Amino acid sequence: MTDRETQLHELGETYLPAEVLERFRERADIFDRENRFFDEDLAELKALGYLELFVPESHGGPGLSLFEVSRLQQRLASAAPATALAINMHLMCTGVVKAMNDRGDDSLNWVFDEVMAGEIFAFGISEPSNDWVLQGSNTEAVPTADGGFELTGVKIFTSLSPVWTRLIVHGAITADDDGIAGPDADEPAEGELVYGFIDRDAAGITVSDEWDVLGMRASQSRATVLDGVVMRPERVSRIIPAGKHPDLLTFAITSNFQLLIAAVYAGVAARALELGAAGLHRRKSAKSGTSFAEVPEARTRLADAHLDFMPVTAMIDAYSRDFDELVDHGAGWPLRLVGARIKAAEAARRNAETALMCTSGGGFGNRHELSRLYRDAAAGLFHPPSADAARPMYAAALLDG
Ligand SMILES: Cc1cc2nc3c(=O)[nH]c(=O)nc-3n(C[C@H](O)[C@H](O)[C@H](O)COP(=O)(O)OP(=O)(O)OC[C@H]3O[C@@H](n4cnc5c(N)ncnc54)[C@H](O)[C@@H]3O)c2cc1C
């Protein structure tokens, strides 16, 4: 092993020891079956310091890089995909703050102190039929006289819904009943978005009872309904125009979101290959008199999936390291970030299907880990932007100057 791989291995053993991962894997089946949140995993992750990974040493944490955290998230997802996907939302919020701090903006560093004090952050951006995602919002944000906002709207798929205590949200700044868009003419007007954090104990927050989904069930990503929820002035992070507008906060969100979600699905994809290989070893072919691990067609199928998967981890490694090293890819960043996430999610789906063919009927049983992985991998179809939404960006980069 190279020095770096040795160091990463040690990080893995520190934050996700093998015996802990085994427990996570066993419980993943129970959480999925009972459709319940991963309370026991969360308790272990907290005890291991996993929620503090991005907090810099200056604030009492280990200050891990995006590259290091993305490797840890791949390891976690290989055992418990839904736990990894949901805890991603907390990690992403803290990774965003670290990224801003690394780039000279310490305005959100209070998040580090709150994380060290035990607060759990979540990501309340997705809204019904809002395919603008970060660039628009259906949530109304009415300015208050003290410089805060009152938010009314619906945030869907809020992972960590049973436990989060701080939620990053955005809303479209809207005139209040008197038609006043802000306290004076210099204050935010319509056509702008506010980004900031709300507290779980604020009045007006309701968490939906509904969560009965195909995969990633333990994430308990229930909808969050906001009814005049106060965002205190000191929790207002950014006011930016709606639409495409370069901003450090949204860049940091996009980077952390895309690469850490990619890491989760890469972990699922890697585990599927392991299960596929185990399946071929286990199955015997009466025709060839050997295990299927020696049957050429079966080997080829697994080999092709492995070959296709290798660029996925290489993309995540390269882009996360570039991000950590403040490399400026300019307009090339979204192509890289979104590409890594789309390709990782494709690999998870493809590898899960390949692995099912390797295990044959055994993997189809609901008690088999692979049948859950196959369902968990399907969730990768829904993270924004979808391949359909992203294609114009890739075409424009080549065709529109
Ligand atoms: C497992 C998983 C976890 C995710 N975690 C997060 C997260 O933590 N934070 C985040 O911001 N995004 C999260 N996402 C959301 C995701 O990234 C996409 O933005 C989302 O799936 C896009 O949905 P859509 O465009 O298909 O939505 P739409 O088709 O517009 O909406 C689909 C969903 O929203 C529900 N819905 C619609 N209207 C309402 C309403 N008025 N009240 C309640 N529910 C309503 C529907 O029942 C349906 O479940 C997660 C997605 C998945 C699959």
Image: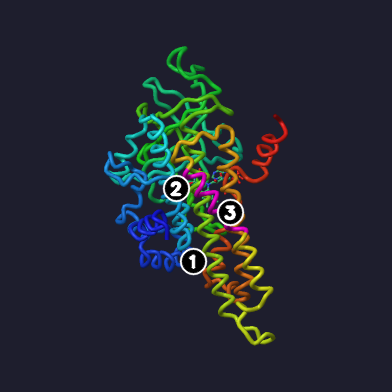
C-alpha gap between disc 2 and disc 3: 16 Å
Q: Is residue 5 left or right of residue 189?
A: left
C-alpha gap between disc 3 and disc 1: 33 Å
* Residue 322 vs residue 227, the one in the foreground: 322
Residue 97 is situated, as x and y percent measured from the top left of the image, at: 39, 37
The residue at 48%/50% (across/down) is 221
C-alpha gap between disc 1 and disc 2: 33 Å
Q: Amino acid at mark 3?
A: Pro
Badge 2: residue crowd in 10 Å (few <14, some 14–19, many ≥20): many
Q: Which mark is residue 33?
A: 1
Badge 1: residue crowd in 10 Å (few <14, some 14–19, many ≥20): some
Which contiguous range is marked in magenta? 308-321
Q: Earlier in the sequence, mark 3 or mark 1?
A: 1
Q: Which mark is residue 191?
A: none
Q: Which mark is residue 67?
A: 2
State which quarter of the image contains the N terminus.
bottom left
Q: Is residue 139 above or below residue 1?
A: above
**Dot 2 lies on which element?**
helix
